[in-house]
Amino acid sequence: MRKEEDDTVRRPWVVGVSGASGTPYAASVIRALLAAGEAVDLVVSRAARLTILDETGISFRDAHWRADLAAWLGGDSGRAEAGLENVRYWAAGDFAAGPSSGSYPAKGMLVVPATTGAVAGIALGLSKDLLQRAAAVTLKERRPLVVCVREAPLDGVTLRHLVELDSAGAVVLPASPGFYAGGSTAQELVDFVAGRVLDAVKVPHTLYRRWAGELGAARSAEGA
Ligand SMILES: Cc1cc2nc3c(=O)[nH]c(=O)nc-3n(C[C@H](O)[C@H](O)[C@H](O)COP(=O)(O)O)c2cc1C
């Protein structure tokens, strides 16, 4: 049997975190993938270190990624770190990393959140860092790619790049929560977007309440 056909081969989702506001979306997606028993290969762009620092107070370091990721995902560090055995981390400048090659057995890639810069780089095939290279590889291998763009307002340049990504087969999923699921806290709205990201790649989750065809159902469930 060839190695690729072996069920015991680890097949991760590559999660690319770029430097847009919205690092809680990434944390929610990573937590939900791990909860679903999926393996995760994590790439954090250089700019994302600034947004993680700004939005969580955590300095994300390559050399201490496990402890920093545990702190970011929450929980007391000892227990949270123990839950990270399904995560592999690759430095953003490491073009020799697994996800840099199409022969690396990734299931696909989720860019959460995606900057307009990452959108442009992926649409144009720039591969300026590992995140963009891994996304290019995902497209060329015809694997699922979800791009969770976060910017407002959007200009024509980015809109054109998003159309390019859609044409190339990516799912363009704006970080734009819906309110029909009854979410009232910021975390619930974050989880709604994260849930839609997982929906796009058919990974099961319980991140939000699905529409069941009845107006007002979420509000009446809240009151119950
Ligand atoms: C605090 C902070 C918030 C930012 N928010 C956004 C954003 O929401 N969307 C965006 O496209 N860029 C945002 N940027 C700018 C990007 O980080 C910048 O364009 C960077 O070059 C993107 O690089 P990357 O795509 O390699 O992560 C933000 C930067 C900082 C420091």
Image: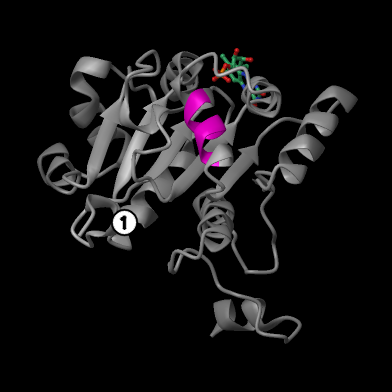
Q: Is residue 216 visible in the rendered structure shown here?
A: yes
Instruction: Return the x and y of residue 115 as percentages of the image width and height.
Output: 63, 26
| Residue stretch rendered in magenta on the structure | 133-138
Dominant secondary structure (helix, strand or loop) of the stretch shown in magenta: helix
Instruction: Return the x and y of residue 67 as percentages of the image width and height.
Output: 19, 29
Question: Is the residue at mark 1 in contact range of ligand 1, meaning its CB lies under 8 Å from it?
Answer: no
Q: To which quarter of the image does residue 158 belong?
A: top right
Horizontal side, residue 54 vs residue 8: left or right: right
Horizontal side, residue 166 vs residue 134: left or right: right
Horizontal side, residue 133 vs residue 219: left or right: left
Q: Tell me which image quadrant ligand 1 sits in.
A: top right
Q: Quadrant of the N terminus?
A: bottom left
Residue under the image location 50 percent in, 58 percent down: 198
Q: Nearer the viewer, residue 99 or 191?
A: 99
The correct choice, above or below, for 196 with respect to 64 in the image is: below
Question: Does the magenta-highlighted stretch encompass residue 205?
Answer: no
Instruction: Return the x and y of residue 77 as percentages of the image width and height.
Output: 16, 37
Q: Which residue is mark 1?
A: 38
Horizontal side, residue 124 vs residue 4: left or right: right
Q: Residue furthest front?
A: 1
The correct choice, above or below, for 120 with respect to 222 in the image is: above
Q: Is residue 153 visible in the rendered structure shown here?
A: no
Q: Residue furthest right?
A: 156
Residue under the image location 46 percent in, 33 percent down: 16
- Amino acid carrying label 1: it is Glu
Instruction: Return the x and y of residue 73 as percentages of the image width and height.
Output: 32, 41
Structural crowding at the residue carrying mark 1, measured as other residues with C-alpha within 10 Å and reported as few (<14), some (14–19) or many (≥20)? some
Residue under the image location 43 percent in, 48 percent down: 28
SS for dot 1: loop
